[in-house]
Every structure is written in structure tokens, then in C-alpha cells.
Amino acid sequence: MSKESLANLLTEERRFAPPAEVAADANITAAAYEVAAEDRLGFWAEQARRLSWEQEPTETLDWSNPPFAKWFADGRLNVAYNCVDRHVEAGHGDRVALYFEGEPGDSRVLTYADLQREVSKAANALTELGVAAGDRVAIYLPMIPEAVIAMLACARIGAPHSLVFGGFSADALATRIEDADARLVITADGGFRRGQPSALKPAVDEALTRPGAARVRSVLVVRRTGQETPWTEGRDVWWHELVDRQSEEHTPQAFEAEHPLFILYTSGTTGKPKGILHTSGGYLTQTSFTHHAVFDLKPETDVYWCTADVGWVTGHSYIVYGPLSNGATQVLYEGTPNTPHNGRWWEIVQKYHVTILYTAPTAIRTCMKWGDDVPAGFDLSSLRILGSVGEPINPEAWVWYRKHIGGDRTPVVDTWWQTETGAVMISPLPGVTVAKPGSAQVPLPGISATVVDDEGRPVANGSGGYLTLTEPWPSMLRTIWGDDQRFVDTYWSRFPGQYFAGDGAKKDDDGDIWLLGRVDDVMLVSGHNISTTEVESALVSHPKVAEAAVVGATDPQTTQAICAFVMLRGTAAEDEGLADELRAHVAKELGPIAKPKRILAVDELPKTRSGKIMRRLLRDVAENRELGDVTTLTDTTVMELIQRKMPSAP
Ligand code: ATP
Ligand code: MG
């Protein structure tokens, strides 16, 4: 971004007050903001008491060597004990922990007592394989219960895990195994994806041929699909042969609060993956608190479902650690939303009476594209809270989500956070906040965030700039694995004393925060900084558009010209007048400055494997350049189709 601050173009007037019944019985009330503002560290010390400590911490934060934080440093706890055993000890052993739904339609139910037995056996198995506290374990699994069990077994013995999303290639897996210096890989023969068994083990075999992965001693393999699987005797071990014969008893040992819990590599939307390190006590405190507060979880009655993959941070914090530490009952689904039909998710909501659903804008926009009639065919009346994460949610997608999934009744919480923050940082609270579609609105109690200008000074209400976090928080990343300097340079050097997240944002007239996308994506048009998010949201608010991606392409007259790629809704057809119609619509919504110069209707947009739009590739197309790195794309043929449709530059 240049000196010129981010233009504030979008005005969204719709407001949604919390439903009376949610407000009346909410886990968190408005008073929490005041309590936390008065004594931030006291507030977090209080939240840490949600957990069961073998040794209670007496010190909350050690910030004597910033930006390297220590939270609850003299406390000791076992993370897996907190997520499993203590619920059984409290008499909730019969409560369902996981309703697993396989893509082919198979299902499994695991209670907390079942989970305790499974995690104990797996912990004993890891110990038999020679894994000790501090050893790293790479996990490359589909969305099956063993993924959760494996993570908890690692946590139980103090072996940091590093999950690699099952859709990543052997190359990506090899670099991550090497960087984390893992000793064990836990994988499966395969998983079910789009109605087919899809192999995983061959990618592990290939990754382990790389010299950097030579220190891996064993590969523990879950049988999921039953497909033919290559085998290396002496190295490979079947899960069902090793784990099943273990004792169901395992005594969890307490570790220091700052003991490493996991390393997770960021998805790579913007460059070389970074190994984000999270530790135990602070991370579990904040994931537990935020899951309780943001989703208003009532563990006795709610059925919670987060559709993320466990390989992303959302899966770590809001499938495994947050929900399980709170004793939640949740759904775990293996497959894609449209196998065998476009209503599969809604069928699952209906089947398990899901009450809280947490998903991503990309999924919501895809469902908009498939049509309103798909969810209308299912009973979704059990839903009471909806959540969104991963990208800014366009106001129109937010309103669609609330109306067509939430029955025009449920609060929608737009949660801003990152792999690096470990847990939700900015979000409305469902029983407190009057929601504004498209805005994450307010930092949670105990969290300090603001929007600053080029000099790092907070901007006035009504202006845009850079989102920063101004005080340390319990679930913050502790460093980049093996590279403290990169940690300091990447996050703490742009604005000294503040954590800079890389995202653009604005404060509205009430001081609420609106995320405007990554600062790398901001466009400069005739001297104005314009957010891609705002132009995309204006396009999505046109009834024919389901999804839009906008980039700035070099332009001799205006520095950059706005170039838009749009995906139409199911019923809309591409015709001659479409581009003009959409241009006029954007001019009306945002003003003439934001009018796209070019508009192209496409069938698909390039997305990362975590579902985020990759604008840099579209910029390459718009500028007639050779495409940059496409390895993190879900589907590389998408780019060929777009390039073919693109007329050469005007
Ligand atoms: P990489 O850092 O490797 O480029 P990534 O940033 O996509 O990958 P994540 O940590 O999963 O990896 O995503 C965090 C980013 O996602 C945020 O910095 C922000 O850009 C975006 N994001 C997440 N939630 C929201 C939200 N509710 N509103 C707006 N943006 C969001
Ligand atoms: Mg990031």
C-alpha cells in the first residue's frame, strides 16, 4: 500500500440483533469486555482455570524478551488429559465425542470413554515405536477418527505433531517432514474422495526417498480404504496390528505449559511455508475459551460441526483442541460437500441434528451457486449458530448463509484469525453483538487489535489501513520452527512493538473492524488504494453472481486497472450485456472509481487447497504473464480454462 490510505467504499446498512433466546442464555455477556479491559492478564488467568492443571500456574505472562512470549510458564498440564480423560472422570464417559460420517456413508460413534481407550492405546503404541517426549511426528491422514486419536496420542506423550493436509503432494510432505525433522509418519492406505478411494501411502513412500527424510524410523498405517498398498518391511506398521493389541490404560504425564504441542505449516497462499510453533497451556486456554464464547457451546445439548480439514489450523483449534477440551459432541465428515449429491452437508445436518456449524466463505458461495433449492430440501431447523472463517465473507454470502441455512434466525459469527494466532481473535459474540454482515467487528475480550496507518498509528473511525495486534495473547505462535529471526522479521518488524498480520482492514464509524483482504492484494487505481474484497463483495451482491475474484492489472493510464473474474449463479446465463450490467452495478454500490475495466465470466476460480482464492495467478493472467507457482492449487486445469477464455489485453 502507498501512503494513501485504503479507500472506504462499501457501506452495509443491514443489522441483525442477537435472537432473544440466545442472548438470554449466552455463555458470555457484554460485561466480559469490561472485565478484560480492566485487567487483561487477570482475565486470561481466570480463563486458564477452565483447564485442569497438575500444577496451577502462578505467573500469567512473561513478556521480558519480546516478541518471545511465555504464558502460564510455571504451570504443568497434559493437553490430552484435558481433552478426554477429565470428561470421563467427571461422569461424561457416555457422551458422544465424535459422530464420524465416512464419504461412502459408513459411520462410527465414539464416546468420550471410547476416545480415552483409543487415545491411550495409540499413546502406548507410539511409545513402543520409540517416540519420546519432544520427538516430532508427521501426520498425513484423511478426515477419519484416527486423525484426532493420533493428534491426542502425540499430545499425551509430549511429542509435537505436524499435520500435513492429505491433498498435498509427496514434495510438500517431504519438505515438511524434513523441516520438522520428524521421526514417525502416521498415514493411511487412502481415504474416500469424490466417491473414489484415493491413495495416500504412495506419497509417503516417495517423500521418504528424499535424503532430508532419512531420519524417519517408522510409518504407522491406518487401513481405511482396503486398497492395495506398497509396503516396506521393518519400517511400515499397520495401525490395527500395533495399536489394537495395546493396553487401554495409559497414565498421562504433565508437561510444562510452554512444551511444544504442534508445528503447522501455513497454507502457502503467499510464499514458502512457515512452520508455525504452538505450545500447550496458553494455546489450550484460548482455544477452549474462544470455542465456548464464540459458539456459545452447551456441551450437554449442542451438536457441533466444523467442516474444515484437521490438516488446517481450523481443524486443530476447532475440531480437536477447542471442542474436545470443552467436552463437545461433534460431527467429523470425511468427504466433499457434493458427494454423492449437492445436498450432502445438509443431509448430515439433518441426520445428526447439528446445532452449530462452522465453515468457510468459499463453501457458502459454492452453495449459493448450486441454488437455494438444495438446502431447502432438508430439515435444518436444529441449527442455532453459524460461523465463518478463512476469508472475508461478502455481505451477500453472509445474508444468504443466515437466510438459507440459518432459517433467517441464527446469528452468524465471522471469525478472523490465522494459523499464527492459534485461535479466534476478532469476532462478534452471538448473544451480545448486533451483527453487521461482512464484518468481524470486535476483538474478543482479552484481545487487543487495531487498524494503523503507514507509521503504525491507529487510524480514525471511518478509515482504512493495516490490521495489527497490540498486546500478546495466550495462543500466539511462539516462533517459526527453527528460525527465530524469520519470526521477528515476518511479524514484528513492519510496526515495531506490534504484530502485523498481513491483512488490510478498516474501522467503520462505530469503530468496528472490517477485514479487506491481504495487503499484497490491494489495488492502486488512479491514486486510490482499493480493496479487492470490497469490489468482490459488490459483484457478489448482484443477483447473477455467486463468486468473484478481483485483481489489479498494470495499466498505462490508471497505474492499475481492475480486472474481475466472476462465477455466475446456477440460473444465470452469460450474455452480451453482462459485463456492462455488472460494471454499472459496482459503480452504483461503490462509486465509479471501483468499476472493473474488464470482466470475465469463468466456470471456476483458482483456489488453494484450503479454499482461498489465489489472486496472484489471476494477476498473472490479466497481465499476460507466465503463471507463477501453482503447486498449492486444488486444480491446476482451472488456470488453463481461464487463460483460454482470456482475450489478450486491450
Ligand atoms: P499463508 O500465510 O501461507 O499465505 P494463509 O494466510 O491463507 O496462508 P491461514 O493462516 O489459514 O493461512 O489464513 C489466515 C488468513 O486468512 C488471514 O490472515 C486472513 O487473510 C484470512 N482470514 C481468515 N479468517 C478471516 C475472516 N474472518 N475475515 C477475513 N479474512 C480472514
Ligand atoms: Mg497467512
Image (cartoon, rainbow, N blue to C red):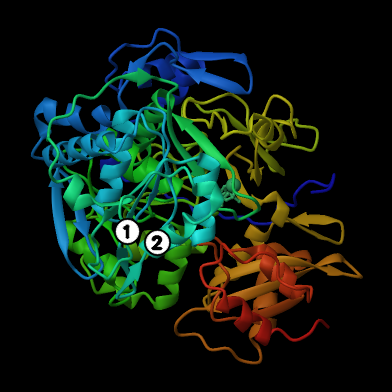
Tell me, for residue 406, which label it has, or none.
Answer: 1
Q: Residues within 10 Å of mark 1 (few under 14, many from 20)?
A: many
Q: Position of residue 640 (x, y in %)?
A: 62, 81
The residue beneath circle 2 is: 401
Type of amino acid at the residue the image marks with label 2 = Tyr
**C-alpha distance separating marks 1 and 2:** 6 Å
Mark 1 or mark 2, earlier in chain = 2
**Secondary structure of the residue carrying numbered label 1:** loop
* Residue displayed at 51% across by 53% down: 174
| Drawn side of residue 506 relative to residue 3, left or right | left
Type of amino acid at the residue the image marks with label 1 = Gly
Q: Quadrant of residue 274?
A: top right
| Drawn side of residue 580 relative to residue 610, left or right | right
**Measured along the vertical axis of the image, is residue 84 above or below residue 173?**
above
**Secondary structure of the residue carrying numbered label 2:** helix
Quadrant containing the C terminus is bottom right
* Residue 292 appearing in the image: no
Q: What is the residue that sits farthest to the bottom in this orientation? A: 576
Q: Position of residue 301 (x, y in %)?
A: 16, 43
Q: What is the residue that sits farthest to the top in this orientation? A: 58
Q: Quadrant of residue 166?
A: bottom left
Q: Residues within 10 Å of mark 2 (few under 14, many from 20)?
A: many
